[in-house]
Amino acid sequence: MKLNQKCEERKVLRDPIHGYIHIEYQLLWELLQTREFQRLRRIHQLGGNYYVYHTAEHSRFAHSLGVYEIVNRMVHEVEDMRNGLSEREKIIAMSAALLHDLGHGPFSHFYESLTKKRHEEVSVDVILDPHSQIHQVLTSYELDLPLEIVAILRHQHPVFVLNQIISSQLDADRMDYLLRDAYETGTSYGTFDLERILRTLRVCDHRLCIKESGIHSVEDYIMARYHMYWQVYLHPDAKAFELLISKFYQRYAQIKHTLPASSLTLLDAPYDLNSFMKLDECRLFSLFQDGLESEDPYLRDIASRILERRLFDWIEDPSARQVETIRSEIEKRGLPLDLYYHEEFSHSSMYLPYREKDEEEAIGVLSASGRVEKLSEKSEIVKALMKMETHTRRRVYFVKKKARFDTF
Amino acid sequence: MKLNQKCEERKVLRDPIHGYIHIEYQLLWELLQTREFQRLRRIHQLGGNYYVYHTAEHSRFAHSLGVYEIVNRMVHEVEDMRNGLSEREKIIAMSAALLHDLGHGPFSHFYESLTKKRHEEVSVDVILDPHSQIHQVLTSYELDLPLEIVAILRHQHPVFVLNQIISSQLDADRMDYLLRDAYETGTSYGTFDLERILRTLRVCDHRLCIKESGIHSVEDYIMARYHMYWQVYLHPDAKAFELLISKFYQRYAQIKHTLPASSLTLLDAPYDLNSFMKLDECRLFSLFQDGLESEDPYLRDIASRILERRLFDWIEDPSARQVETIRSEIEKRGLPLDLYYHEEFSHSSMYLPYREKDEEEAIGVLSASGRVEKLSEKSEIVKALMKMETHTRRRVYFVKKKARFDTF
Amino acid sequence: MKLNQKCEERKVLRDPIHGYIHIEYQLLWELLQTREFQRLRRIHQLGGNYYVYHTAEHSRFAHSLGVYEIVNRMVHEVEDMRNGLSEREKIIAMSAALLHDLGHGPFSHFYESLTKKRHEEVSVDVILDPHSQIHQVLTSYELDLPLEIVAILRHQHPVFVLNQIISSQLDADRMDYLLRDAYETGTSYGTFDLERILRTLRVCDHRLCIKESGIHSVEDYIMARYHMYWQVYLHPDAKAFELLISKFYQRYAQIKHTLPASSLTLLDAPYDLNSFMKLDECRLFSLFQDGLESEDPYLRDIASRILERRLFDWIEDPSARQVETIRSEIEKRGLPLDLYYHEEFSHSSMYLPYREKDEEEAIGVLSASGRVEKLSEKSEIVKALMKMETHTRRRVYFVKKKARFDTF
Amino acid sequence: MKLNQKCEERKVLRDPIHGYIHIEYQLLWELLQTREFQRLRRIHQLGGNYYVYHTAEHSRFAHSLGVYEIVNRMVHEVEDMRNGLSEREKIIAMSAALLHDLGHGPFSHFYESLTKKRHEEVSVDVILDPHSQIHQVLTSYELDLPLEIVAILRHQHPVFVLNQIISSQLDADRMDYLLRDAYETGTSYGTFDLERILRTLRVCDHRLCIKESGIHSVEDYIMARYHMYWQVYLHPDAKAFELLISKFYQRYAQIKHTLPASSLTLLDAPYDLNSFMKLDECRLFSLFQDGLESEDPYLRDIASRILERRLFDWIEDPSARQVETIRSEIEKRGLPLDLYYHEEFSHSSMYLPYREKDEEEAIGVLSASGRVEKLSEKSEIVKALMKMETHTRRRVYFVKKKARFDTF
C-alpha cells in the first residue's frame, strides 16, 4: 500500500478535548485497529489516580488519539511545518504520535519497576517486533517505517523537529495530557490556550520555537504543568494506591514457591510481547481477585485493601519519634514491616515545570527581529520559576489502624 | 453506630459534572469503601459504547456518586423535601441513590441475557445478602436498613417521593447520566439546566412536580434524553460490539464440553454473590485474551475481533435480496451463520423520551393557582412529542469481508 | 484595489464563541473600520433584554463578526462551497455576512415602529448611500459591489446558495445568535453542535441541505431556537422595557410643540443617513436623561422609570374584570391610560422554531441514495413540532402601584 | 423598614459566571433599582478594552452583581464568617460589595484625570450625598447605614474582615473580575478555582487567610491576575483608544472659548452628583458625534478616529532616532505634536500580581498546627514571583500615516 493512501472516507471521532479527531490516512486508521493499540484502552492514563480523582478514568488510548490530533494540527496548521515537511514526514510524525505510549504497562510505575525497563523502550520493542500487528501494518506500507518511527521515539531522527513535536518542552504529548487530565479530573489547573500556542509556534534552525507574542500562553502552559504535578500527578494517595500493588507483587514473589500453579504465575512471565499483551490493568484486577482466595493471609489482606480502597496512611518529614511509634505499632500487631511500612524520598527539583539545562532543552523565543533567545531571557516569570527553591521530602507510608473488613 | 453519625471531616470529591461531591454522613462514606461498591469502577457506565465514543470510559462508580450528589442536593435544597423529610429519610434516600446501580453486570445487556435477571433485582440481592459488605455496613447502623433501601429500589417505599427521586421521569439517575454521558462523550446533546430544575422542583400530594416556570427546563431535559438515545445510547456500532461479546459466550457454551478446565469456566458459574463479584468487565477481557489461545478457531476468531475492534457491519431494513446475498456469502466462506450473522428488531416506541401512561408516570406541573396538571397539558412541545410516529426497524449484523488479521 | 487583496498579516480576533475570528481579506478589514460598522457597538444585540438578563450586554458588532466567521468557515470548509464557489463569490458572501445587520436602529423594534421601515431595508440604504463609508470602501474595490451585496440581502442573488447562507432556516445568522445569546445570558438552551452541522452541510440543486447523519444536530438546533424564543427573546419583562421607550417617544410626540428646541428634536429627524448614524442606543439614553429635566411631568416620569428600571407589570389573558380594575385604578390616580396602560396580542404561531411553507423554505435532507427530502419527512420530531398547537395570547401591561422615587 | 427585611420572593438572576445571583434582602433589591446603580450599565467594566477584545462589552453593573454574589457566598458559606458575623454585618458587607464601584466615571482612567479624583472617593460621595437615591434607600433602613458602608470602602470598619472581603489580595472584587473578564474576552487566562478558594477560606485574628490545602488555588489565582494584566488590562491598543479620548478633551479645553454653547459644555461641569450622573459612556459617545460637527478640524479629526476606530500606533523603548523621525513626520504634516504624539512610562513593578509590603497586605496561610504564616513563606512559586525583575518601559504613541477617511 502507498504510504499516503487516504481512507475511503475521512474518519471523524468525537473528542471532548479537541472537538473531533480527524483521521485521513489509511495507515493511521489501520494502526488504530491493531491489538497492541487497542490494548491501551485497558491502561489508565493516570494509573491509579482514579482512586483519588474518581473521574480520572480515561485511558492512554484516548490520550494517544489526542496527541495524534495535536500533531495532525501542528504539521498542517503551523506554516513552517506545513511548508517545511514532506507529506511522508508528516505521516511519520503522526504515526509516532499515535504510537508513542504503546509500551506503557499496567500502572506504569509498578510495571517499570517489575520489568526494569522504561516504557519508551517497550514502545520501541513492540514496534520492532515482527510479530506485533503494529509492525506488520507498518511494514506493509514501507519496510523501514518501523525504524523511522523508532528514530523519532529515540529522539534521533535527522529531521530534528519531528523529535521535538513528540518529545520536548513544547511537545504534543504534554499539551494533550494537561488538557485531558484537567478535563477528566474536573480541575481547572491544566487549562491553557492551545489555539494560541499553535498559532505562535514556529520552526527556527530546525527547532520548535514560539513567536514573542505567544510568550504568555507558554508561561500559562508551564504553570499548568506545575499545578497539575502538585495537585494531581503527585497526589500522595495515588502513590499509596500504587504502593499496595507493589506490595502485592512483593508478597507474591516471596511466597510463590509455596503456591500451586495459578494464574498468578503471569507475574513471573518473561516480558515478551505475548505476556506484555496480557498484562494490562484488567488482568491485574483479576489477579487481585484471585489473590483473595490465596492461602497466604498477607496476600489476601493486601488484595482486599486494593479491592476495597483501604489505602495506607502517610506523613511527610516525620520526626524520628513518629517513625519509631509507627513502626513499633505495626510490629506489635505482628505485621511484617517490609509489607506494611514504606518510606521514600521525593525531590521537588524533579518536578520543576520548566528546565533549561542546555540550549537544546530550552524553549526558544523568536523575536520580531528574527533572533531566537531562550525563554528564560524573555520571560521574567519563567526566570523567577527557575530560581525556585527545591526541597527533598521524606514520606512515610504505613498501614492504618485495624478497621472493619481488615484481616489484620 | 447512629444513622446520622457525621464523618470527622466532611469528604469532598472533585467531580467535573457537579463541581464537588459532598459526603457528610459516616454511613455513606463506609458504603463507598465496600468491595461491592468499589467493583463499580470496573463496569463502564455505557457498556461497550467506548468502542464508538472513545472517551466514554467513565464507570458506574462515578455515575453512582453523581446520582448521590443530586439526591443530596434535592433533599437539602428543595424546600418541600428539606422541610418535609426527616433526617433519617434523607439519609436513606441518599443511600439508595448511591446503591441503585450495584447490580449491573459487565456489559449490562449481555449479562442480563446471560443470567436472565434484571440488574435492579441483582442490586436488591446484593443489599440483602448477609455476606455482602454493603449489607454488613448497613446493618451495623440499623438492622432494617437494607429492607428500607430495597423498598425504595422496588418503588414500594411508603414515603412515595423517595421512590420518585430514585426512579421516575424526574429522577436523579437520569439527570446525572445525561449530563455525565454528554460530558464524557463530548457531545452537547445531553446538557440541560440542572440548576433551574432543582430550583423549580416541588413535592405535591407526595409526588415530585415542577413549578410552571420550570417547564422549559423540563422540555429541554426531555429533548436531551431523546438526543442521547439516538446519538449515543442506541448507536448501532455499540450494539455491534456487545453482539460480539454475546457471540463469544454463545460459542463458548457450544463447545465447553470439549474444552479443558480453564478460567473460562467462570462463565458457567451459578450467579451467586461470589461469582458476581468476580465477573466484572476486567475479568471478561481476561477471558477474551484466554480465548485467543483456545483450540477452537471460532472462539479465537471472535476473541480477536473483540480485542482488535473489528466489528460486524450492519444495514437497516434490508431487502430480502440483500439479506440473501449477505447470508450466502457467509456460507460460502464456510462460516456458521449463527455466529456470524444476526438480526434484531428495534421499536422506536421503546425509546420515547417521555411517557404518560397513567397519572403516576406523568410529570406534574404545579400552576400558580396551586393545581397540578400533567406536563402534556401544559407543554405544547411535549404534547407534540407524544404524538410522534414510531417505527419498527429490522437491523441485520454480519461479518465483514476478510481483512488482514482475520482468521476467516 | 483588487477584490482578493489580502491583509499584510491575517487579523485574528479572540472570540469566546468561535475561539477566533479570522480576517484575511483587506476589503473585510476595511469594512470593519467604517463609521457605520463601528456604530453597531452601540446597538445591543438583544435590545433591552439586558434589563432582564443583566449579562446580555453584547452588541450587534460582536454578532456581525460571528456571522462573518461562520460564513468564512462555511465557504472554506464545506466542500460543496469550497469547490463550487469562486473566490469572488466567497468574498461577497463574507461581506454580506458582516454587513447584514447594519440597518438595525436603537432597540430595533422601537426604531422600526418609529420609522415604519424594516431594518433589512435600512441596511440596503446604507450600503447604497454614496455618502456612507461602507459604500465608499466597497466601490473602491468594484463599482457594482454594493449592488451585489444588496442582491444577497434581498435574497435575489443568482447564486442561490449565497442568499441562503445569509438568510434561511440554516443560515449563519441564527447559528451565531443562538450560540452567542446563550453564552452571554448564561442559559444553556441555545447550545447546539455547530461543528457537526458544518460537517454535514451540503449544497444540492443550488440549495443548502444537510446529510442524513446530521439530522440530529439540526433537530437540536431547532429546539435551541424554540427554547431561546420562549426563555429569552420573548421575555415579557424585556417587552415591558421596550414599551417604556415607546411611551417616552409617544409622550414626546404629543408635547413637542410645547417644548423649547432641545436635543430631543433628534427624535423628529427625517431618517437620513446622518440622523440614523446619530440615533444609537447611547444617544437614546442621553435623551432619556435630558427628559428628566423636561417640564412635562409624564415625560419626566417615564424617563425616570427607564433609567431606574421600574418596569410596568403585566398579566396574560386577563379576565374582563381584571382589566377593568387595572384601568380604573390608573384613572383614579389621574394617569392617562394611553401612557400607563398597554395591551397586545401575541400569536405563538409566529414563533414556531421551524416552518415548511414551501419547498424553498424547508430544510432539505440529503439521503445516502442522493435524494433530497424535506426535513419533516425524515425527522419524526420535526414533524411532531410542526403539528404543535398554537395560541393567541393577550397581554396587558400597566403601571405598578406608586413606589418610592415614582412621581406618580 | 427593618434592615433584615426579606424580599417577598427571593430574586434569582441568571449569571454565566456564578450560575445565579441570589438576592434575599429587600434592601439589596432596592439598592439595585436606584438611578445611580442602574447607571453602571452604561460604564464598561474594562473601559475601552472592547476596542481590542471586541466581546469585552460587559458593564460594571454585571460585575457589581458578581462581587455581591461572591460576598453573599463568603458570609454564608465560609464557616468562620457564617458563625462569626452578625446578620447586620453580613447585610452591610453585601451592600458594600454591591456599591463599591458606584464612583467609576466613563472610561475610568480618563475620568479620574479629568476630575483629579479617584473613583473610590466618588463612590463615597454618592453614598453620602443626601440627594442620591442610594443614600435615601440606605437611610430609610438605618440612618447611619451610609457611614457604615463608607467605613468599609475606606478600609476603616472596626470588624476588619469586612474591609478585607471588599478590598485585599483575596477580595471578592478581584475574584469576580478575573473570572468575568476572562469569560467575556474569551481568554482562558483568568480562570481559577473559585470553589476551592471559598472552601479553604478562613478568618484568623480577624483577617482573611487560606488553609494550607488551598495554597495551590491561590497560586493559580495570582497567576491568573498576572496573565490578565499583561494580556488584557494593559493592552497597548486599549490605552491607545483611551488616549484618543483624552486628546479629544484636551482639544476641547483648548478651543472651548471659541465654540458656541453646545452640549459639549457638559465636559466643563463641576463634578457634582448631577453632572456625574449624566456623564456616562453613552453621553461621551454622543459628545464625540457632536464633535464631528465642530468647526475645529482637529476636534473633528479626533472624534472621527474614535468613532471609526483608527487608533494611534505605538512602539516600545524607541531609539532617539526613531522618536525624532516620528515627531518630524507629524510636524511635516502640519499636525500639532501635543495632540498627535504622546509618550508615557510604565513600571512593571506596579503590576506585580502579588505583594507583601507588610503583614497586613500579605495573604495569610493557616497551617494544620494553627499558625498563620505569610503566603511567601509557604509557596515557593509566590516567593519566586516576588523576586521577579521589573522594568520601566517608555511607550510612544503617534498618529498613523494618512489613510482613507482621515482628515489629515
Image (spheres, coloured by chain):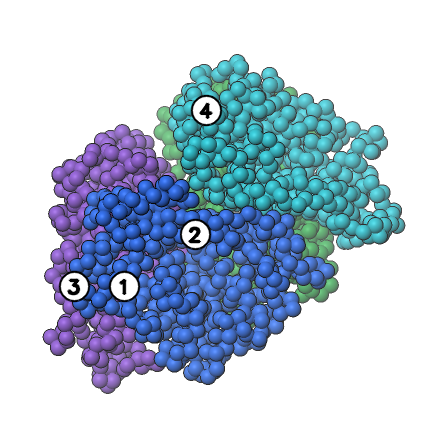
Chain colours: A green, B cyan, C blue, D purple
Residue B232 vertical placement versus C213 (above, below): above
- The numbered disc on residue C345 is 2
Q: Amino acid at mark 2?
A: Phe
Q: CA distance from mark 4 to mark 3?
A: 61 Å
Q: CA distance from mark 3 to mark 1?
A: 37 Å
| Mark 4 residue crowding within 10 angstroms, few (<14) / some (14–19) / many (20+) | many
- In the image, what residue occupies the spot 23% across and 62% down? C255
| Secondary element type, mark 4 | helix
| Secondary element type, mark 1 | helix
Q: CA distance from mark 2 to mark 1?
A: 24 Å
Q: Are marks 4 and 2 in contact (CB under 8 Å)?
A: no
Q: Circle 3 marks a residue in which chain?
A: D
* Pointers 3 and 1 within a single chain: no
- In the image, what residue occupies the spot 69% across and 31% down? B112
- The numbered disc on residue B302 is none
Q: Nearer the viewer, residue D15 or A223?
A: D15
Q: CA distance from mark 4 to mark 1?
A: 63 Å
Q: Between tags 4 and 2, which lies in front?
A: 2
Q: Are marks 4 and 3 in contact (CB under 8 Å)?
A: no
Confirm whether residue D245 shows in the render. no
Residue D136: name its quadrant: top left
Residue underneath mark 4: B90
Residue underneath mark 3: D114
- The numbered disc on residue C253 is 1
Q: Position of residue D35 (x, y in %)?
A: 22, 51
